[in-house]
Image: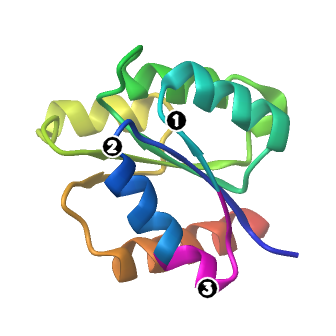
């Protein structure tokens, strides 16, 4: 069965980048451009992982992360926060405190992000 990832980012180029890299690797990729859309998709599809931007048009991604992790059905979903501007130590600590397992700065290397996703999913399976 394909691993499912939900990419929540208002930048279509980021969503395209992730989709074009992960789909050939066997992932099923869903996309959302807002926090509200992301929450709705996550509840409906229960992805294995969520790649979540901090700067969304309707919410702070770290708050969306907290809401995702509060849902029992999503408690094992791996959340990685990505940000192009909130990359200071305090920002990263806040994201991790809200339930993310990693906080990645943009721009990022897809090969490294994919390896992190695989490693984190292996850790959750145990």
Mark before the other along the chain sequence, 1 or 3? 3
Circle 2 SS class: loop
Residue 59 in picture, x, y percent from top left: 40, 16
Do callouts 1 and 3 mark residues in contact (Cβ within 8 Å)?
Answer: no
Q: Quadrant of the N terminus?
A: bottom right
State the residue at coordinates (42%, 31%): 97
Do callouts 1 and 2 mark residues in contact (Cβ within 8 Å)?
Answer: no
Q: Which residues are magenta?
A: 21-29
Nearest to the observer: residue 122 or residue 41: 41
The crowding category of the residue bearing disc 2, from other C-alpha atoms within 10 Å (few below 14, some 14 to 19, many at least 20), is some
**Residue bearing the label numbered 3:** 25
The label on residue 11 is 2
The label on residue 66 is none
Which one is in front in this view, the residue at disc 1 or the one at disc 2?
2
Nearest to the observer: residue 107 or residue 63: 107
Magenta stretch encompasses residue 46: no
**Residue bearing the label numbered 1:** 99
């Amino acid at each position: 069965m394909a691993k499912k990832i939900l990419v929540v980012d208002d930048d279509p180029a980021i969503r395209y980048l992730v989709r074009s890299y992960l789909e050939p690797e066997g992932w099923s990729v869903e996309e959302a451009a807002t926090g509200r859309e992301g929450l709705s998709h996550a509840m409906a599809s229960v992805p294995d992982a969520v790649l979540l931007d901090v700067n969304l048009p309707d919410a702070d991604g770290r708050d969306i992360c907290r809401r995702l992790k509060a849902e029992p059905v999503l408690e094992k979903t791996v959340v990685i926060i990505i940000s192009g501007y909130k990359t200071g130590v305090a920002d990263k600590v806040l994201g991790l405190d809200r339930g993310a397992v990693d906080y990645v700065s943009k721009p990022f290397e897809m090969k490294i992000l994919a390896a992190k996703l695989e490693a984190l999913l292996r850790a959750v399976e145990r």
